[in-house]
Image (cartoon, rainbow, N blue to C red):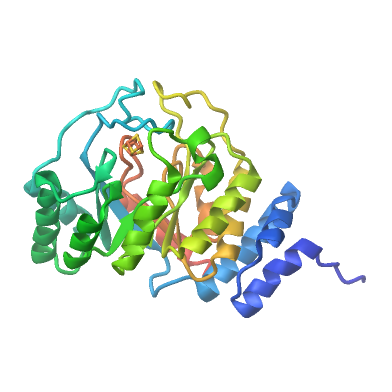
Amino acid sequence: MDQPVLHPQIAAAYRVLETGEPISHAEALLLAELPGELALDLASLANKVKNRYGSGSEALHACSIMNAKSGVCGENCRFCAQSRHNRADIEVYDLVDAESVLIEARNCFSAGVSHFGIVTSGYGYKRINPEFQRVLDMIDRLHAELPELSVCASLGMLGEEPAAALAAHGIAHYNINIQVAPDRYSELIADTHSVEERIETIKLLRKNNISVCCGGIMGVGETMKDRIAMIFALQELDVSVIPLNVLVPIEGTPLAGKEPVSVAEIVKTFAICRLAHPHKVIKFAAGRETIMKDFQGLLMLSGANGYLTGGYLTTRGRDIADDQRFARQIATFN
Ligand code: SF4
């Protein structure tokens, strides 16, 4: 019987498995053109790369977030229910008190979550104002009462002083996403701020030795080429954790009614991201339940080694306990 001929594009993925060295940008563009029938071959290789090189001792990294300040954001991110430029029907509230954050964090920790993120809507903090100081106090309180929990934050753009303060208060990771290919940010995401301001914040975080969690969103009108440009921009920024979201179109936002990206394309994007970042944590965030539905397990076998559990900023997710059962099943493939 004839030996099967290895598809030349797939050969690049085998090389990553053997060496742990990432694919090049040019190879990623070729992999993006693989027909749908080869998407599972690519996913399987990406899963092997994740098993061999994926960061950390945990097979699957689970984290939870709390929306600690919701809505009335002056930025115009097109996908976001919290922008005051949009007309989404969401709960709006100012920064919650430290007790509420502690209760939520305790629930997540006792359900088995290791990383808990405090998230606030808005542009961010260029200075340490009283509101930012309250967030710092919350971080201290979580460290004091739940010393084994890793505390993360996502507070928008930062200036020198707030970035240094977060480092001093022992933040585990700071989340700030570039969302799409940098050269398409103003067209696809927002034009009230620039992607350069986000990148400046990432550089400040790195300067303060804060581990950066930075990724993007699929389904906002980008092409596969744009997604690859984003994946390689993340390589240059040397981020530690890469959350990938799939748009959940929300009524009242400009992206309501947007056609979903196909499952095969999402699988290919995760696999290519893993091959470009063999050693990083890659997390599946929003869209896992609502968009991937029956296929969400497939993403965890296509290179992802983490997930956001217990809900998103303005949409509900799956129960932490259900996700833990799911993680145990996924682990049987490792
Ligand atoms: S993503 Fe953040 S900055 Fe953009 S509108 Fe929503 S809350 Fe504001």
Task: Judge by depth and name the residue closer to the eye, 30 or 164.
Answer: 164
Camera-side residue of 331 and 16: 16
Note whether 149 is above or below 71 in the view shown.
below
Indicate whether 302 appears above or below 89: below
Instruction: Name which quarter of the figure residue 28 lies in.
Output: bottom right
Q: Is residue 302 left or right of residue 307?
A: right
Residue displayed at 23% across by 35% down: 70
Q: Position of residue 59 (x, y in %)?
A: 42, 69
| Rendered residue at 54%/75% (across/down) | 52
Q: Left or right of 153: which side holds 216?
A: right
Q: Residue at x 43, y 30 (%)?
A: 78
Q: Is residue 324 visible?
A: no
Query: Can residue 310 be seen in this snapshot?
Result: yes
Q: Position of residue 149 (x, y in %)?
A: 21, 64
> In the current view of this chain or complex, which residue is farthest to the bottom?
19
Query: Which residue is at a point 86% across and 67% down the rendered structure image?
Result: 5
Residues 317 and 241: in front is 241
Q: How many marks?
A: 0
Front residue of this view, candidates 210 and 119: 210
Q: Is residue 151 above or below residue 158?
A: below
In percent of width and height, residue 145 lies at: 8, 63
Left or right of 103 in this view: 246 = right
Question: Percent x, y for residue 174?
Answer: 31, 57
Quadrant of image for the N terminus: bottom right
> Residue 151 falls in which quadrant of the image?
bottom left
- Tell me where residue 6 sits by quadrant: bottom right
Quadrant where ligand 1 appears: top left
